[in-house]
Image: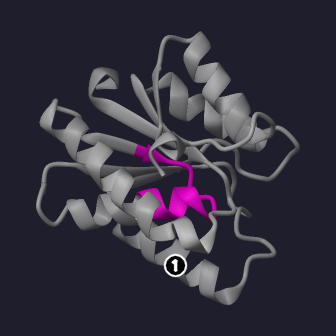
């Protein structure tokens, strides 16, 4: 299963003017992976890039019915402090995914890192939206590279 699994990591803030370009770049890269036999797509459920990735997978699943969206969520309180609109989008994605799991029951300072490592540990490819070399996305990309997971940084195409 790992050899057919791709995960995603990216910033929570996606510039509005790049939204459509990122969405299209995601579609192109995901379709390439589907054509190579990938069928499992793990997303962390965060705002921004994770949400875009999940939405692209749900759209593509209408054509590629065999692909699976798997949400790997850090804790049950992930949406605490989010706007009602963002929570509604999150719940819609959660209701339409093939499976979701929590890496921790409750929030603690390392639960996001635990979620990110889980995503990478069960994947052979990681599609990233990385524009700066600090923070959780940079940590996850470095972790992926150190563990032999191929990283596709779509910010290079935007």
Question: Number of labelled discs?
Answer: 1
Whether residue 49 appears in magenta in the rendering, the answer is yes
**Residue at 49%, 43% in the rendered image:** 8
Residue that sits furthest to the right in the current view: 109
Q: Quadrant of residue 144?
A: top right
Along the line of sight, the residue nearer the viewer: 130 or 87 = 130
In the picture provided, is 105 more to the left or to the right than 48? right
Please state the horizontal and vertical placement of residue 136, each as a whole percent of the image.
74, 40
In the picture provided, is 76 more to the left or to the right than 21? right
Q: Quadrant of residue 88?
A: bottom right
Asked which secondary structure carries label 1, the reply is helix
Q: Quadrant of residue 14?
A: bottom right
Report if residue 97 is visible in the image.
no
Name above or below for residue 145 compared with residue 81.
Answer: above
**Residue at 46%, 53% in the rendered image:** 100
Name above or below for residue 150 compared with residue 67.
Answer: above
Q: Which residue is mark 1?
A: 89
**Residue at 32%, 58% in the rendered image:** 57
Residue extent of the magenta highlight = 42-53
Along the line of sight, the residue nearer the viewer: 142 or 106 = 142
Please state the horizontal and vertical placement of residue 98, each as a whole percent of the image.
32, 56
In the picture provided, is 106 more to the left or to the right than 33? right
Please state the horizontal and vertical placement of residue 104, each as a whole percent of the image.
70, 44
Name above or below for residue 140 compared with residue 102.
Answer: above
Along the line of sight, the residue nearer the viewer: 137 or 1 = 137
Q: Quadrant of the N terminus?
A: top left
Please state the horizontal and vertical placement of residue 126, each as a whole percent of the image.
46, 32
Whether residue 94 appears in magenta in the rendering, the answer is no
């Amino acid at each position: 299963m790992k050899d057919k699994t791709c995960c995603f990591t990216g910033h929570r803030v996606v510039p509005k003017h790049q939204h459509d370009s990122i969405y299209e770049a995601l579609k192109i890269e995901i379709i390439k992976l589907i054509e190579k036999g990938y069928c499992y797509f793990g997303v962390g459920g965060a705002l921004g890039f994770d949400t875009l990735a999940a939405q692209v997978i749900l759209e593509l699943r209408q054509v590629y019915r065999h692909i699976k969206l798997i949400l790997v969520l850090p804790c049950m309180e992930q949406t605490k402090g989010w706007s009602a609109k963002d929570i509604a989008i999150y719940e819609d994605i959660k209701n339409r995914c093939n499976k979701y799991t929590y890496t921790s029951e409750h929030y603690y300072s390392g639960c996001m890192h635990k979620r990110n490592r889980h995503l990478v540990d069960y994947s052979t490819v990681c599609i990233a939206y990385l524009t700066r070399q600090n923070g959780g996305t940079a940590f996850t990309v470095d972790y992926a590279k150190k563990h032999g997971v191929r990283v596709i940084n779509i910010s290079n195409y935007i």
